[in-house]
Image: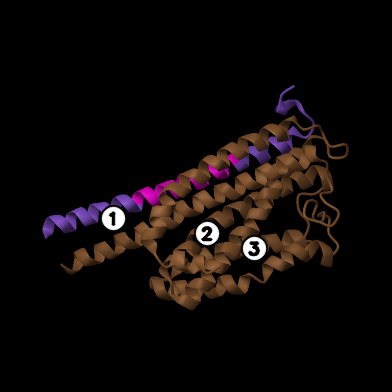
Amino acid sequence: MTWAPAFLSNPERFMAFSRWAAPMFGVIAALLGAAGLYFGFTAPEDYQQGQTVRIMFIHVPAAQMSMFAYACLGVASFLSLIFRHTLADCAAQAAAPLGAAFTFLALVTGSLWGRPMWGTWWVWDGRLTSVLVLFLLYIAYMALRASMDDEVKAARAGAILALVGSINLPIIHYSVEWWNSLHQGSSIFREGGPAMPPVFWIPLLLMALAYMSAFGSLWLVRIRGEVWRRRAEAAALRAARR
Amino acid sequence: MSMLDVKYAEFIVPAFVITGLVFAGMIGFSLNLSRRWKARFEALSRAGADEE
């Protein structure tokens, strides 16, 4: 892992890398997403869930990405807090809106899947409530950053909030084991292999990889935007001093 | 048979539509953020170079 801080320590190298990596991940996401949707919609109905099983192909990757984006936010916040590195702070700031969007998708698509399957839009059980808390953490992070004019103080306060909030990730993951829940446990990454046939887990895997590539692409684009914003503000300050 | 005719279409179709809209929003806002600030930085840099 020594390459990551070294890579992050050089904004010019990052900008050169992200210039081609962001569109490349975008194209990969589009191809994987198209394949995932094709196989998802040509898969047979589930014997219990019928056609609603197709919501799984967009709900599960969104839920995974909501947690992955927060893990990225946490790692970037840690690097920003310890090394005071600007690019790490840019990465943290860029991950938050994307994570919030994926969490929103996980909550909404989960609710639309839960209503016909569970008979309710929402229950205050461990899994659903902890994911709602994750969404609120993203909102709180963005609100905190936006409420402070001093960029350095905002970075530090945001990083502390993000790191404290990361305790929610294992809670989300283990919530279905720790507490009674309508939500099912892990169906893919579990002992004995996936709990579903390849006709379902292959499109699910394709969609998960598509979401991951899409996040990678958009994250890089947003970090670039954040770097440009800070450069523009520095240039505006220099212009004002002249 | 279209997706609109299947059982529970009233839940499946909105799930996919909302996902598409959120993705469109994420792509649009992210590209706009990057392009806007890049253009702003380049304009300020040009103005700075002209003054010097």
> Where does label 1 land, which residue?
B41
Q: Which chain carries label 3?
A: A
Label number found at residue A211? none
Q: Which residue is drawn at 30% across and 50% down?
A: B39
Q: Label 2: few (<14), some or many (≥20) within 10 Å?
A: many
Does any portion of residue A219 appear in the rendered image? Answer: yes
Q: Label 1: few (<14), some or many (≥20) within 10 Å?
A: many
Percent x, y for residue B2? 71, 24
Q: Which chain carries label 2?
A: A
Percent x, y for residue A28? 55, 41
Q: Share a chain, discs 3 and 2?
A: yes
Does any portion of residue A225 appear in the rendered image? Answer: no
Label number found at residue A134? 3
Residue mark closest to the camera, 3 vs 1: 1
Of helix, strand and loop, which mostly describes the magenta segment?
A: helix
The answer to whether A14 appears left or right of A239 in the picture is right
Q: Residue at x 82, y 54 (%)?
A: A184
The residue furthest left is B52
Label 1 residue SS? helix
Range of magenta residues: B20-36
The chain assigned the colour purple in the figure is B
Q: Is residue A229 above or below residue A78?
A: above
What amino acid is labelled 3 in the image?
Answer: Leu
Distance from the alpha carbon under mark 3 to that under mark 1: 34 Å
Which colour is chain A painted?
Answer: brown
Q: Share a chain, discs 2 and 1?
A: no
